[in-house]
Image (spheres, rainbow, N blue to C red):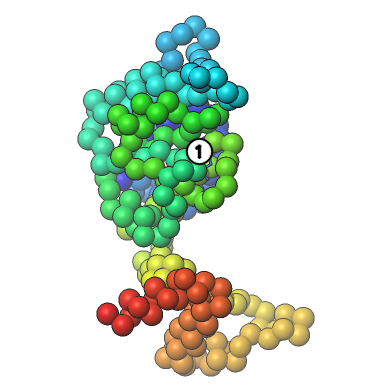
Amino acid sequence: MRIDIITALPSLLHSPLNDSIVKRSQTKGIVQIEVHDLRHFSTNKNKNIDDYAFGGGAGMVMSAEPIARCIEHLKSERRYDEFIYMTPDGETLNQRIANKISTLKNIIILCGHYKGVDERVREKYITREISIGDYVLSGGELAAAVLADAVIRLLPGVLNDETSALTDSFQDDLLAPPVYTRPANFEGQLVPDILLSGNEKAIENWRMEQAAERTKIRRPDLWKRFTSNSEE
Ligand code: ADE
């Protein structure tokens, strides 16, 4: 998979994309991530990429031209499956969306800033708009990093244990069960006996029950979906 991220602040993306699993997936050649600095696509001498909003009001708007130039440059090199704009007014990211995006070959992610991007960029290029939640960040970079992380960990070969992404919370509309590691006794708090029993079947049942209980209590909305899907 190839992910091209267009941003006014490339340095904000450096750390999240160059550590841990996301870094390893690039080293392994499973994903290629290219970050494009919008200023390189500005043609004015101050390298401006934003301007005042027509009609007035506080806040700058990201200009259409540098974004269009960057996207056209990328489009001339390969075919893209999706042009994603990170914005608080997009559809809220969930596991289903991450799963879908992880099946694509080439995607572009555009990060907004200030008051957002000129609406004409959205009309002309953007095929999907994604929010990571009902709150406003200073820019789309952290949101883009969240999306990239959620997608990349699903790609075959990224996680060592092939089954581990499948047992994540949300993957089947259930939250994950509690987990424990050594010591078995932490200041008087004991690990449930069953996990020490060596009885794999019983452990699997216990985990399933715990996942169900957690989901019922914490996320009745997910539980409802889980039970209606299991009935089908
Ligand atoms: N840009 C600013 N806030 C955002 C959010 N919540 N999700 C995605 N992009 C954003």
> Which image quarter holds the N terminus?
top left
- Left or right: 24 with respect to 78? right
Q: Relative to 39, does residue 223 appear above or below in the rendering? A: below
- Say whether residue 136 is left or right of residue 74: right
Q: In which quarter of the image is residue 98?
A: bottom left
**Residue extending furthest toward the top:** 45
Frontmost residue, 185 versus 11:
11
| Furthest-right residue in this view | 187
* Quadrant in the picture for the C terminus: bottom left
Residue 229 in view: yes
Q: Nearer the viewer, residue 175 or 26?
A: 175
Q: Can the viewer see residue 49?
A: no
Indicate the position of residue 20 as horizontal and vertical percent values.
51, 51
Q: Where is residue 74 in the image (x, y as percent from the top left)?
A: 30, 28
Which residue is pictured at 58% across the width and 23% down the height?
57
Q: Residue at x 55, y 91 (%)?
A: 194
Tag 1: amino acid: Gly
Query: Residue 156 occupies which quadrant of the picture?
Result: bottom left
What residue is shown with label 1?
A: 140
The spot of residue 144 in percent (x, y) is 46, 42
Depth check: 55 or 30 in front?
55
Residue at the image point whose x is 63% and y is 85% from the top: 191
> Residue 76: horizontal and vertical position, in percent?
24, 25
Is the CB of mark 1 within 8 Å of ligand 1?
Answer: yes
Q: Quadrant of residue 153?
A: bottom left
Above or below, 176 against 129 in this view is below
SS under mark 1: loop
* Residue found farthest to the front: 55
The residue shown at (40%, 38%) is 85
Q: Is 100 above or below relative to 76? A: below
